[in-house]
Structure formats: C-alpha cells, structure tokens
Amino acid sequence: MDKKKVILGLSGGVDSSVAIIELKKQGYDVEAMFMRNWDSATNNDILGNPDLNDDICPQEKDYNDALEVAKECNIKLHRVDFISEYWDNVFTYFLDEYKKGRTPNPDIMCNKYIKFDAFMKEAIKLGADYIAMGHYARVKHFNDHSIMLRGVDSNKDQTYFLCMLRQEQLRKALFPVGDLTKQEVRKIALENNLYTAKKKDSTGICFIGERNFKAFLQNYLPAKPGKMVTLDGKEIGKHDGLMYYTIGQRKGLGIGGSHDYNNEAWFVIGKNLAKNELLVGQGIDNPYLYSDHCFAEDCNWIYEKPLENKVYQAKFRYRQADIEVMIKHLPDNKMEVKYLVPVRAVTPGQAVVIYDGEVCLGGAIISEVYMKEEKRLY
C-alpha cells in the first residue's frame, strides 16, 4: 500500500522541524514547503517607503534554517511565494481594521487565506493527500467530518488562531505536535540533533518583526492626533492617533501626575471615533473596561453550529482563561455572545472563539461590546 503524502509547512522554527520527525514516525511520505509571504523591499517601495529597514523580518535566515532541517531529515523542500495573496487577504485587512479603530488579528487571517488555502492548493498540485503545520492543535478525522481540539499543552494551544478554518480545510490537515508539550518538542529536537533545536521562538507579526509597532504603522496609515479625555469629557492629554492604542492598554499614554486625580495608573478604556478622542480612566479594573455581552460578525463554524440553550467556553484573546458564555445566532452570519460573568477589555476586531470542552467549534470577529444596554465606545 502506498504511503499517504504529506506536505508540511516548514517555517524554519523548532515546532515545524519536529513535525517532520513525528510525521515520519507515523509512516507518512513527507515533503516540506517554505512560504515567503512578505517582501519588505517591494512592499515598502510600492508605498513610497524604501528607507524602512528590510532585515527586520529575516525570512532568508528562516529559509536557510528550513533547508538545513530538510537536509538533516532527508526530505525535499519546496519554496513558494504568496506575497500577493498575503498582501490582498491579510495585510490589506490589517490596515482596513485599523482605519476603523479596531484591533485586528492578522494571524487568524493568515491561517484562513494563506496556510490553509493558498498553501493547500499548492500542496495538492504536488500530489499531497494532507498538509501539516506546526501548530499546537489536534484534529480528529471521522468518515464524514473532522473536528479540531485544543493542543495538549494548554500554555501553547493555538486553536484560537485556527478558528476560521473551514471543514474542507480541516479534512486535509494534520497537526503533528498537537499531542506534545513545548518541552517535549524541544527534547525531540535535541535528541535528533535538529539544526533548529535551540532556536528561539518567533514572536509578533512577521511583517513588523522586532520593529516598533507605532513606527511601522506610521508608514502605512496617516496619523490623526487628537484629545485624550476622561468619560466626563475632561481633556488630560493628547493622543497620536486612535489606531496606535488598544482597549485596556496602560503603557505609552504619557499622562503625568495631576492634583485632580489620585496616583492610580491610567488605562485606555474606549475610543470615540466620531470625535477622534481617546477615552482614558484610572484603575486596572475600571468599570468601563467591563462588558457582559458582545456582538460578533463573520461567524465560522468548523463542523456544526453551537446550540443556543447551552453553556460553552469562549476566549476573547489568545491565552485568556476560559469564559462561560451562551450564544444567540443572528441573521447575516452574526451572533450575540452573552457572558455569565462580566469580562474585561473585550475588543472589537479581535476574535471570539467558542469551545465545547476540548473541541474548538469556531469563532467570529467582535464588532460591538455592551454592558447591559450601554454600548461601549470601543
């Protein structure tokens, strides 16, 4: 019987490197593909910003690392460019969301449109039965459907970022390190003397890299400075542009001491887009930061829609503790999510991801946030 062929997304990191070892153990015929999704020089030149530092996102270093691992594991490595697809489906979305004053999660869109769409199409051309990624998630394939489960390592579980996968994408997906902890992954890498065994985990968004986020965004969107005000309308400072701030943020506000206020820390508690005002308030548990329900759009259910009369678990951001919720389906692929207890800093533009125990059911993009009947100015 012929072995099933798997094309692995090899990023040059330790997780995808160990995925090769695991796939081979399971008897698959393994090849790998390295994705190049961002071209700093070209993209910056398009926007008239040729002076940006192009070595911030070291894709060539990652590609060379991937080559070394592929050689060590004796597998073929393909290289493919998805630069235009990434620009059209991920980066443009990223900018559009910031223009709306929201806080997007481009990693979710990268998984939806690049890693499990453009990549999958390319892999199928190469004869793949499955694709595999180094995400900390698990998949169970049944005769007529597949479900996604949280990764065994709860601290590394990445199902939050996979909430927009469709059933047909999951049907052809494998997550070889989903049953392992990060510690076990490192151990396997060391035992097999992999080139990436001690490589530091990447953080942040590739196209930003180690670059200052605010400085990066300034090159793509015009800033609109405005007032920094309290809920009662008192101006206590200036902001550099609403897009540079997120709900619950403490650092970088530059609010000095005042005789009118105590020494409690200041936080971003809202945004008034109509007036271009940044709302700030004191205290990490400022009441305005809390909500008890939200509305979300672009709902995606991986297999089945959740029920309306059942309590589920939700995450409103990565690595957040589970929140018990109930949902109500609405027209136009929207839903209302009611939390059993108020939650801090639920932020428009981020994803709300719904779980039934270990199973990730899917998610949606948060659009509006409420406390009782009052809409939060987020």
Image (spheres, helix red, strand yellow):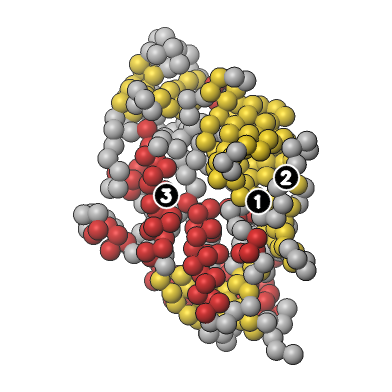
Q: Residue 93 carries which label?
A: 3
Q: What element carries label 1?
A: strand
Graded by Cα atoms within 10 Å as few (under 14), some (14 to 19) or many (20 or more), the crowding at tag 3 reads: some
- Whole-number angstrom distance, CA of label 3 to CA of label 1: 21 Å
The percent coordinates of residue 113 (x first, y second) are 50, 60
Residue lying furthest bottom: 1
Query: Considering depth in this image, is 32 or 286 the residue closer to the camera?
Result: 32
Q: What residue is shown at x 35% (from left), y 23% (from top)?
A: 275
Apparent side of residue 368 relative to residue 215 in the rendered image (left or right): right
Eyeballing the image, is 164 above or below 100? below
Name the residue at the front extreme: 331
Question: Decide: marks 2, 1 in contact (CB < 8 A)?
Answer: yes
- From this viewpoint, is residue 253 visible? yes
**Mark 2 or mark 3, earlier in chain:** 3
Q: What element carries label 2?
A: loop
Circle 1 residue: 301
Which residue carries the number 2 mark?
306
Nearest to N terminus: mark 2 or mark 1: 1
The image shows residue 28 at horizontal and vertical percentages of 68, 81
Residue 292 image-quadrant placement: top right
Q: Quadrant of residue 54?
A: bottom left
Identify which residue is drawn at 75% across, 66% down: 144
Tell me which numbered mark, 3 or 1, is placed earlier along the sequence: 3
Horizontal side of 215 relative to 163 (left or right) equals: left
Q: Is residue 57 above or below residue 16?
A: above
Mark 1: amino acid: Trp
Examine the rendered structure and indicate whether residue 171 appears above or below residue 89: below
Mark 3 vs mark 1: give the one in front. Answer: 1
288, 46: nearer the viewer: 46
Q: In this view, does 103 lie above or below 144?
A: above
Tag 3 secondary structure: helix
Q: Which mark is residue 287?
A: none
